[in-house]
Amino acid sequence: MPFLELFDETLDINSTENYELSIQVSPDGLSFCLLDSIRNKFILIRSFGAEENKYFNADKISELLLKDDFLTKRYKKVHCVMPSSKFTLVPTPLFDPGKKVEYFTFNHTMKDDHIVLVDKISDPDAFLVFSVSRSISELINSVYPGVYPHHHIKLLLDHTSSIRKSVNGNYIHVHVERDFFNLIIFNNNILKFCNSFAYRNISDILYYVLNAFKNLDIKQEETIYFSGITEKYDDLSSSFSLYIRNIRFAEPSGNFTFSYVFNDTELHRFMNLFNVVNCE
């Protein structure tokens, strides 16, 4: 099982009531980090990933939650992210909470043992309707009562809010998960495109992104921001550099800093996990 752990020497398992826990859970894996709320500094990250071609079920996630020495502690605050490829955006003036399942099934097929959740987005003013595993959602609620999971698209849109307002023209963001990626495009701070695509290889990602460029008349001189499962000089970024002149990697942003132990870490890989602390 792929594993990552980084922690600051000031980490104190007996002081967790001064920490905020951010946890990301999906069939692809479980990751969490700790923010020292006194110093507003991230001091730990721990990540468990499923093996290639395998997934975590609720039993495996329960095992990790109940056996990990930090995940069973009490915290000042707990934040949760549940990535999902299936979502739809509904403008706030048109949204009726009683019709959330109807909104979702208009675009997607509901899987067995899945439920529909809703996340509010401020910019653009909309509700994000998405599905997650019922068993995993109930597990999170049993371990962390009252914690409502956020969809990762909300965090991506919130993250882009301040950046794209200073950009004239297009702001383009590609977020990569293990089996799908998201493409978000703003033009002059207006959302023009936000979608999720399943992929099997890098060529699929290139095809969908370049096709969107063509349909939206976006020039290849534009800048693309990447986050998620990609890094500098890997096959994905190297392939994109053949077509796109400017490639950047998005960085977490907020009223926080990072311990020096994160210095050599690709922070954009866990951007949503860090940025969820910005949610009220």
Image (cartoon, rainbow, N blue to C red):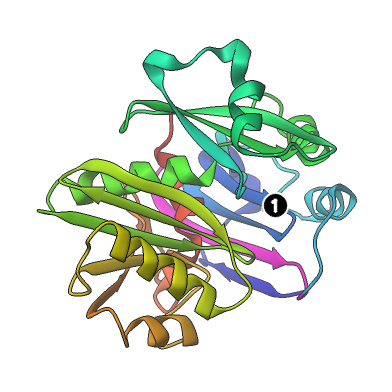
Q: Is residue 48 magenta?
A: yes
Kindly identify the residue that appears in the image at 34 percent across and 50 percent down: 256
Identify residue type, mark 1.
Answer: Ser
Q: Position of residue 271 (x, y in %)?
A: 44, 58
Looking at the picture, tell me which residue is in the foreground, 20 or 25. Answer: 25
| Residue to which mark 1 is pinned | 26
Query: Would you say 134 lies left or right of 268 here?
Result: right
Q: Position of residue 243 (x, y in %)?
A: 30, 82
Q: Residue placed farthest to the right in the image?
A: 59
Residue 267 position by quadrant = bottom left
Q: Position of residue 268 (x, y in %)?
A: 42, 65
Q: Which quarter of the rendering shows the C terminus?
A: top left
Above-or-below relation of 280 to 159: above
Residues rendered magenta in the picture: 37-52
Above-or-below relation of 243 to 150: below
Q: Which quarter of the rendering shows the N terminus?
A: bottom right
The number of numbered badges drawn on the structure is 1
Query: Would you say 259 lies left or right of 16 here?
Result: left
Residue 232: tell me if it is visible: no
Kindly identify the residue that appears in the image at 67 percent across and 37 percent down: 131
Residue 212 position by quadrant = bottom left
Kindly identify the residue that appears in the image at 29 percent across and 72 percent down: 248
